[in-house]
């Protein structure tokens, strides 16, 4: 699959002036955003991955197949950064989500093994309150048995007032959820 890095933006004004639908990926630090993007485009290193939380500090844009842009947003949560830097990240992400006309959908990633915390719930509620199209993606499903995955989903979904059909179960390792994710992206982006 054709995919290439376009640009990184620290400020909203630095976002590329391209008129393609954008799919943004957001979630806690180390939830698997970079791995998910790499898996979707069938590349190992298009997006740099790291075991260290908070490595993504800019909004990163990737052109996919000359008609779609994937946007890797900085992770939120436990990254070891200063309060000032955290405020700048929050402002940058909020401005992008509110003002980017090309934004077609946000994929909010959650680690299936972890309880959603106040940041996850706050981001979700913020996105819903603004009427931004969104999909909830549970990552790292290969780390649990099918039974445990189902138990975790049944425990978490009421937090977001969602049903099973409104989510994606994803694993970069086993490629679970890749086909469903592409079906949703194709429908959203009219491709």
Image (cartoon, helix red, strand yellow):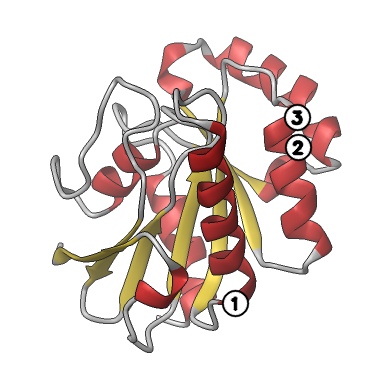
**Taking 85 as reference, is 122 left or right?**
right
Confirm or deny contact between disc 2 and disc 1 (CB under 8 A).
no
Q: Secondary structure at mark 2?
A: helix
Please state which of the two labelled residues, at mark 2 or mark 1, is closer to the viewer: 1
Confirm or deny contact between disc 3 and disc 1 (CB under 8 A).
no
Nearest the eye: 46 or 16:
16
Confirm or deny contact between disc 3 and disc 2 (CB under 8 A).
yes
Label 2 and label 1: CA atoms lie apart by: 21 Å
Q: Is residue 17 above or below residue 109?
A: below
Q: Secondary structure at mark 3?
A: helix
Graded by Cα atoms within 10 Å as few (under 14), some (14 to 19) or many (20 or more), the crowding at tag 3 reads few
Q: For residue 4, what is the image quadrant?
A: bottom left
The residue sitting at 86% across, 41% down in the picture is 161
Graded by Cα atoms within 10 Å as few (under 14), some (14 to 19) or many (20 or more), the crowding at tag 2 reads few
The residue identified by callout 3 is: 118
Q: How many marks?
A: 3
The spot of residue 42 in percent (x, y) is: 18, 49
Label 3 and label 2: CA atoms lie apart by: 5 Å
In the rendered structure, find residue 164 and report the number of the disc placed on it: none
Q: Give the mark nearer the N terminus: 2 vs 1.
A: 1
The spot of residue 58 in percent (x, y) is: 36, 52
Nearest the eye: 107 or 141:
107
Q: For residue 134, what is the image quadrant?
A: bottom right
Q: Is residue 78 above or below residue 9?
A: above
The residue sitting at 47% across, 82% down in the picture is 190
In the rendered structure, find residue 121 and report the number of the disc placed on it: 2
Which quarter of the image is occupied by the N terminus? bottom left
The residue identified by callout 1 is: 99
The residue sitting at 69% across, 67% down in the picture is 132
Label 3 and label 1: CA atoms lie apart by: 24 Å
């Amino acid at each position: 699959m054709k995919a290439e890095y376009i640009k990184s933006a620290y400020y909203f004004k630095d976002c590329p002036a391209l008129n393609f639908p954008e799919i943004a990926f957001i979630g806690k630090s180390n939830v698997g955003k970079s791995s998910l993007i790499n898996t979707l485009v069938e590349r190992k290193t298009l997006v740099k991955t790291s075991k260290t939380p908070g490595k993504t500090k800019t909004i990163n844009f990737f052109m996919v197949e000359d008609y779609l842009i994937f946007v890797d947003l900085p992770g939120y949560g436990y990254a070891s950064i200063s309060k000032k830097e955290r405020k700048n990240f929050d402002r940058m992400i909020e401005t992008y989500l509110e003002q980017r006309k090309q934004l077609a959908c946000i994929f909010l990633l959650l680690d299936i093994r972890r309880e959603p915390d106040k940041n996850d719930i706050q981001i979700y509620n913020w996105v819903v309150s603004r009427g931004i199209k969104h999909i909830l993606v549970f990552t790292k499903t290969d780390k649990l048995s099918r039974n445990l995955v189902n138990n975790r989903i049944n425990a978490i979904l009421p937090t977001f007032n969602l049903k099973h059909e409104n989510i994606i179960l994803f694993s970069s390792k086993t490629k679970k959820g890749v086909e469903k994710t592409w079906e949703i992206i194709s429908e959203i982006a009219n491709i």
